[in-house]
Image: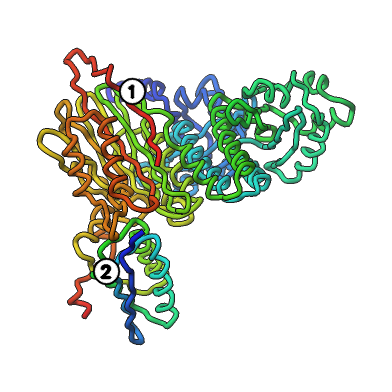
């Protein structure tokens, strides 16, 4: 199966973690994002910015990941911000009706 | 004087109206005595007239009933909303299960109380409205119970442990005791599980079961269920029956001690073979079994049989989930007046752990509901969520057939689960006039017709996910010969060469190229197009439901001859 490569680019300072995702986020790759999130939180990060703008595809397990992360952030008291993916990958959020429920932010406001 | 006459007339008319209500209405005075009851309340309490009721000791009124809350906790008079209200509290409505001690009949009632105040604002009395919610409560409890059973069955390869868990779950909600026996080919039996609502009674129950012969008597009890493959229900157990059944004095003593009120035995069946039986006994609760209980026990037994057989045949637990999952699809596509329908279901390759797609059809009066969905999540829990979604939808549609309301009920049921459970669903109501739809996080269907291929409806929120949620409902106008195509994301996410996805555009194109085709032909075209595109193993389940709106004549005759093109494709 030809899979577009998936990568996570992590940059963080003491307070804020940034995960820039690229490629395809699906069942095969969600676990890597979960691990990266756990690692960032273990370092004491209080704000996590997940940049989806490099993603070409997100499947329903990717969608589930963001629902879970959002609920975890609320329950555990840290802040999650999502940067919008390209239009094609954004579709999964539109179809799910969760565009307004998930913490999407403009890239510029987080720069 | 005239005012008083008018008042009396008004009272009389009010009493007539209240007596005509199906809901029981009572009025309680501050001394806790009931001072009024309408006819339904008198019937319920077993009084001939209001004056008899007034004289009665209020504590004795609950006497004919064994009353508990939904968790099995005892309800006393002091817990009643009206009594709380008179004590100055602000009571919540109370859901109460009551079992009539003499008839064994179980009912669920919802008690709501409101205060009647005098001019000074003092509480003069408390009015209680008692609504019978037996059907709705049972439907809800059963749906949730079946989902938990599905989960249990899929959770372990050790079927003996699994059956013990199922038996444990059945008490006390369904019966006071529950036991499972498996049969071998020569009429022998193996007792696998027994559970009792009062653990102290387990010992008695086990001793009693040791009296049952190793070789079953085909004429009675378990043996007769094994022979006939039919459920057996005994709703009245007289002492003579016990005397006749007892082997010796000790046996009779045990039988009497248990105080059985009703027994229900349902077979565990695989094909035409009866591999075991589920026995339920009611004693302490005084409950009997009705036709609904038999049907419900049969549903539990059907699931248990699948689990046992799968465990015997296979060693992978994913197989059980998969088997349960495909058992959740309808066996055949029904004939829907005014519509011609075909469906496709292709399960993902066996190496995948992606949870399942499903679709379902059922009728609600003159109209039909269709639901297609996709349970997000991995492994064994998915089948349980599918089952919860499907049965919740069916139960919900008994009260309200609006697609938006059905999705709302599924969303609520998923939220009540302890872990995050997500599900997409598209619900369509099909009539001779057209279709009404609501989507919950599910791709919108495509309308295929002379005007081309276009998405119809409005997006709604993924079920079980986040609030606030909304499920806008759309009426879909259709011309005769136009087709609605509902699908899951396994179709559009199918992977081709170079990691490319099939996508909505390719789906539209292949539908447009076959716009005039009948549903079954359209299904064949879709499968061909998908298979040509796809490389490697199919990663996700794929489900498609194709519904062509009929060219029905004004006299109401549908395009009957062409209907019911059903069946499932294979991957």
Neighbourhood count class around disc 2 (C-alpha, 10 Å): few under 14, some 14–19, many 20 upward: many
Residue at image position (56%, 50%) is: B317
Q: Is residue B146 above or below residue B553?
A: below
The type of colouring in the image is rainbow
Mark 2 → mark 1, Cα distance in angstroms = 46 Å
User: Is B257 left or right of B330, judged from the image as shown?
Assistant: right
- Image location of residue B396, percent across then percent down: 38, 36
Quarter of image, res B47: top right
Q: Nearer the viewer, residue B110 or B45?
A: B110
Q: Is residue B564 above or below residue A98?
A: above
Task: Check disc 1 and report the residue beneath it.
Answer: B335
Mark carried by residue A38: none
Q: Chain of mark 1?
A: B
Whether residue B408 is visible:
yes
Q: Please, which residue is most extreme toward the top here?
A: B555
Q: Please, which residue is most extreme toward the bottom here?
A: A14
- Image location of residue B124, percent across then percent down: 42, 40
Q: Chain of mark 2?
A: A
Q: Nearer the viewer, residue B391 or A12?
A: A12
Q: Nearer the viewer, residue B452 or B57?
A: B452
Task: Check disc 2 and report the residue beneath it.
Answer: A52
Quarter of image, res A6: bottom left
- Image location of residue B417, percent across then percent down: 47, 52
Residue at image position (28%, 63%) is: A102
Q: Please, which residue is most extreme toward the right here?
A: B249
Q: Contact (CB < 8 A) between labels 2 and 1?
A: no
User: Is B268 left or right of B435, judged from the image as shown?
Assistant: right
Residue at image position (61%, 40%) is: B170
């Amino acid at each position: 199966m030809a899979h577009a490569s998936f990568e996570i680019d992590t940059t963080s300072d003491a307070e804020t973690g940034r995960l820039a995702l690229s490629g395809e986020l699906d069942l095969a790759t969600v676990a890597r994002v979960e691990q990266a999130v756990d690692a960032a939180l273990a370092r004491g990060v209080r704000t996590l910015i997940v940049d989806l703008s490099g993603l070409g595809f997100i499947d329903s397990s990717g969608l589930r990941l963001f629902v879970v992360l959002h609920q975890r952030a609320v329950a555990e008291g840290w802040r999650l911000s999502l940067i919008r993916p390209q239009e094609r990958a954004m579709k999964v959020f539109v179809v799910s009706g969760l565009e307004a429920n998930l913490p999407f932010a403009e890239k510029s406001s987080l720069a | 004087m005239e005012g008083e006459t008018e008042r009396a007339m008004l009272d009389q008319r009010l009493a007539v109206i209240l007596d005509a209500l199906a809901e029981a209405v009572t009025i309680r005075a501050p001394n806790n005595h009931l001072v009024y009851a309408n006819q339904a309340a008198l019937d319920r309490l077993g009084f001939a007239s209001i004056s008899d009721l007034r004289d009665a000791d209020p504590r004795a009124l609950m006497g004919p009933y064994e009353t508990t809350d939904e968790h099995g906790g005892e309800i006393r008079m002091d817990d009643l909303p009206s009594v709380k209200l008179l004590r100055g509290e602000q009571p919540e409505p109370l859901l109460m299960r009551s079992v009539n001690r003499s008839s064994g009949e179980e009912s669920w009632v919802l008690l709501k109380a409101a205060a009647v105040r005098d001019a000074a604002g003092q509480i003069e009395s408390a009015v209680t409205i008692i609504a019978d919610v037996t059907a709705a409560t049972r439907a809800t409890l059963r749906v949730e119970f079946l989902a938990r059973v599905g989960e249990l069955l899929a959770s372990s390869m050790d079927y003996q442990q699994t059956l013990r868990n199922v038996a444990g779950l059945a008490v006390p909600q369904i019966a006071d005791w529950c036991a499972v026996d498996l049969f071998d080919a020569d009429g022998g039996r193996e007792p696998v599980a027994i559970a009792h609502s009062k653990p102290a009674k387990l010992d008695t129950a086990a001793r009693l079961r040791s009296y049952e012969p190793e070789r079953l008597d085909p004429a009675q009890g378990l043996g007769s269920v094994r022979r006939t493959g039919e459920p057996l229900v005994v709703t009245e157990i007289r002492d003579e029956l016990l005397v006749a059944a007892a082997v010796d004095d000790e046996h009779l003593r045990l039988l009497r001690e248990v105080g059985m009120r009703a027994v229900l035995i349902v077979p565990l069946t695989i094909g035409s073979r009866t591999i075991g039986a589920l026995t339920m006994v009611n004693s302490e609760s005084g409950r009997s079994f009705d036709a609904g209980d038999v049907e419900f026990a049969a549903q539990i037994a059907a699931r248990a049989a699948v689990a046992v057989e799968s465990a015997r045949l296979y060693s992978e637990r994913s197989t059980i989930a998969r088997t349960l999952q495909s058992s959740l699809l309808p066996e055949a596509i029904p004939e829907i007046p005014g519509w011609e329908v075909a469906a496709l279901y292709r399960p993902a390759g066996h190496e995948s752990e992606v949870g399942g797609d499903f679709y379902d059809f059922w009728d609600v009066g003159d109209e039909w509901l269709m639901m297609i969905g996709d349970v997000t999540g991995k492994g064994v829990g998915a089948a349980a969520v599918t089952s919860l979604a499907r049965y919740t939808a069916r139960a919900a549609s008994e009260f309200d057939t609006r697609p938006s309301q059905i999705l709302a009920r599924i969303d609520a049921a998923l939220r009540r689960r302890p872990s995050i459970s997500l599900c997409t669903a598209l619900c369509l109501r099909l009539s001779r006039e057209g279709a009404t739809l609501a989507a919950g996080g599910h791709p919108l269907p495509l309308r295929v017709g002379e005007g081309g291929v276009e998405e119809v409806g409005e997006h709604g929120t993924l079920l079980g996910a986040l609030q606030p949620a909304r499920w806008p409902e759309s009426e879909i106008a259709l011309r005769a010969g136009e087709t609605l195509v509902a699908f899951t994301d396994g179709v559009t996410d199918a992977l081709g060469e170079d990691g490319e996805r099939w996508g909505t555009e390719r789906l539209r194109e292949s539908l447009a190229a076959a716009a005039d085709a009948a549903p079954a032909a359209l299904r064949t075209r879709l499968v061909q197009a998908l298979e040509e595109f796809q490389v490697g193993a199919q990663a996700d389940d794929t489900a498609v439901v194709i519904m062509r709106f009929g060219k029905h004549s004004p006299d109401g005759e549908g395009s009957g001859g062409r209907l019911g093109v059903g069946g499932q494709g294979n991957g």
